[in-house]
Amino acid sequence: MFARKIRVEFEDNGQRLPCPLKWLDNFSMRNFTNASVFDDTLPVSDGAMEIGAKVPLAQLKDAMEDWFRRKSYLPKGAVLVISEG
């Protein structure tokens, strides 16, 4: 649907795992993020999203990591990793 495909994973204790679809869906609901820059995001499966050409990856990573921490999804010390392709 969107031009770019990205992987959304988290690294914890040296192991990299895909973010569950539930997390991605939760973030993508605009009534929670209230940031129109992320309107062009579509979760498709665990660890996979499609995004629009104008979605800034660095800003998306920061916003997702913040949201996942506030929701207590990310384990303490875990790091979010977003890669395109």
Image: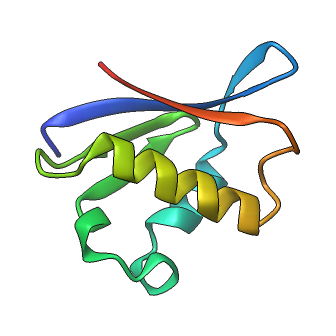
In the foreground, 9 or 59: 59
Residue visible at 88% across and 44% down in the picture: 76
Left or right: 36 as drawn, with respect to 8: left
Residue visible at 52% across and 81% down in the picture: 32
| Quarter that holds the C terminus | top left
Image location of residue 59, percent across then percent down: 36, 52
Is 37 above or below relative to 78? below
Image location of residue 48, percent across then percent down: 45, 35
Applied colour scheme: rainbow
Is 79 above or below relative to 28? above
**Quadrant in the rendering for residue 6:** top left
In the foreground, 25 or 11: 11
Residue visible at 53% across and 55% down in the picture: 64
Residue visible at 39% across and 51% down in the picture: 60
Image location of residue 33, percent across then percent down: 47, 76
Left or right: 49 as drawn, with respect to 52: right
Left or right: 46 as drawn, with respect to 69: left
* Callout count: 0
**Quadrant in the rendering for residue 66:** bottom right
Left or right: 21 as drawn, with respect to 44: right
Image location of residue 44, percent across then percent down: 42, 43
Q: Most extreme residue toward the top, as rendered?
A: 14
